Amino acid sequence: MKRLLRAGCVLSLVLSLAAGGAVVAAGVLFALLPRDVPLVVEEPLGPYPVPEPPEGPLSGLVVYLSAGHGWLLHRVRHDGEPIAWGRQRSVRYGMVEDDWTAAFVADYLAPAIEAAGGTVIALRERDRNPVAAISDDGDPSHYAERIVVRVEDPLAQGGSYLRLEPDGGSVWWLEVPYDGHWYLYTRWVASEAHDDRAVYTINAGGVSRQVVVDQRAHGGHWWPLADLCLFGGDLVEVVLNGSGGGLPAADAVRLGGGSYVFAPPFDWKVRNRPLFDVAMPHQIEHLGAPEALSTYECGNPVSDMRLRPHWASWASPDGEEAVYLSIHTNASPRGRARGLTVFAGIDKTPPTPAGPASVRLANALERSIFETVRSRDPGYVTRGVRLGNFSEISPVHNDLTGALLELGFHDDRGDAARLQTPQFREDAAKGTVEGLIQWRRGADEGR
Ligand SMILES: [Zn+2]
């Protein structure tokens, strides 16, 4: 540990030199660090003291948050031949559902859940930046000591990761590409031998914070560490230390969302969109997942609405306290309709009833969202809780307790205007968090 702290001190020195006027490219900084820094181990490393978990009424709960729709390679009947590239909904009254859900999740709902102590795993990228910087084990921007072994694994970034001694450590550096709001992630590969309380310390933008993760689970996908306002050229430093409770696994860190670039087979023209805009199936490689997840055994691609619950069911380990929330706005197939509808999932193939925990969750969310929004907006109405045969929350496709929120009708003039106000989005997020808290309390009371 001492050795890594020492590298951090030298880093600050280099940064202050850089701030002194000289323009120093990150490559130069990385060349200086850490291999050219004389490091002396004065005493055995670690184990690192483990900080307390985040406090709050949702502490310990993992929320798989699915912002509905997004840019998609449309196929004949969802899984056939590709026919078009575009959003899944059209512009109505100044909004498009595909974009609204992503912005609501990134700017309102995910931050509100995190402020209450919950962990958010977003199924669509929350970072709007079209670029991403990755530092992987083995890159010059990564350093590790007390390495047990390099493990080859298809679920690791770049195909391998480092397994460290319990008192080993690892540090990654990333250069911020330009001024902006950036999300920082890390990943590892899960194993029973790995540290159940691995400590990541994030030093960036003058802020230092720690995130504790259980590396026995959630391997092979990115885990959120922080979102930060950073200046271009700044260095982000991420340090991994073990708790002494197992072997820390050092794989990679990522800053930024990045883009989806591809040429669809119907015209072979190159398309390029920030992953923030893109539907979940095109994020699957970016999210991290076993390859087999995105196609059926026959080779057909799994549709957007099915891949989301399949991925969450894969990512969430047995026994995790977790919920799946699907965020949508509604459209009326005939006649006019408005207001909130909250669905608990059922299925018809085979006929499967909704899980009791999901029904309870849908009820808690419906009541709380409606009451919270209505307290400042008397025009908001609710259509109540319903059972929905939707793949995303289907008990056949989704192992998690879940609910699908249709927060308003984007084809209703009044609801569309309401959905676009900061007040509505604030209150809908607040109501969702309050609903999750009440649902949890009910579970504790065994209702
Ligand atoms: Zn929708």
Image (spheres, rainbow, N blue to C red):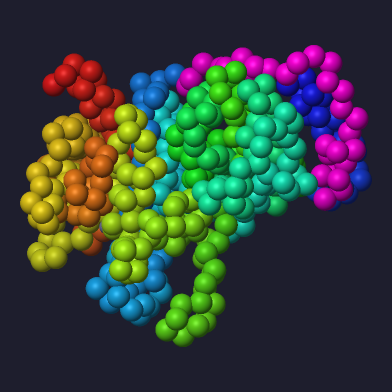
Chief SS of the magenta region: loop
Q: Quadrant of residue 246?
A: top right
Q: Which residues are magenta?
A: 27-54
- Quadrant of picture, ligand 1: bottom left
Q: Is residue 373 magenta?
A: no
Q: Residue at x 18, y 37 (%)?
A: 358
Is residue 88 shown left or right of residue 33? left
Residue 84, how many percent across, how many down?
37, 78
Q: Residue 49, can we see it? A: yes
- Say which of 235 and 199 sits in front: 199
Q: Quadrant of residue 234?
A: top right
Seen in the image, is 235 located left or right of residue 255? right
Residue appearing at x 83%, y 37% in the figure: 34
Residue 255 in sight here: no
- 51 drawn magenta: yes
Q: In the image, what residue occupies the spot 19% across and 46% down?
A: 395
Q: Looking at the image, is 358 positioned above or below residue 40?
A: below
Q: 102 and 173: which one is in front?
A: 173
Q: Residue at x 68, y 17 (%)?
A: 46
Q: In the picture, which quadrant includes the N terminus? A: top right
Asked whether, in this view, residue 170 is left or right of residue 277, the answer is: right
Nearer to the camera, 393 or 95 = 393
Tell me the quadrant of the picture where the C terminus can be found: top left
Q: Is residue 166 left or right of residue 115?
A: right
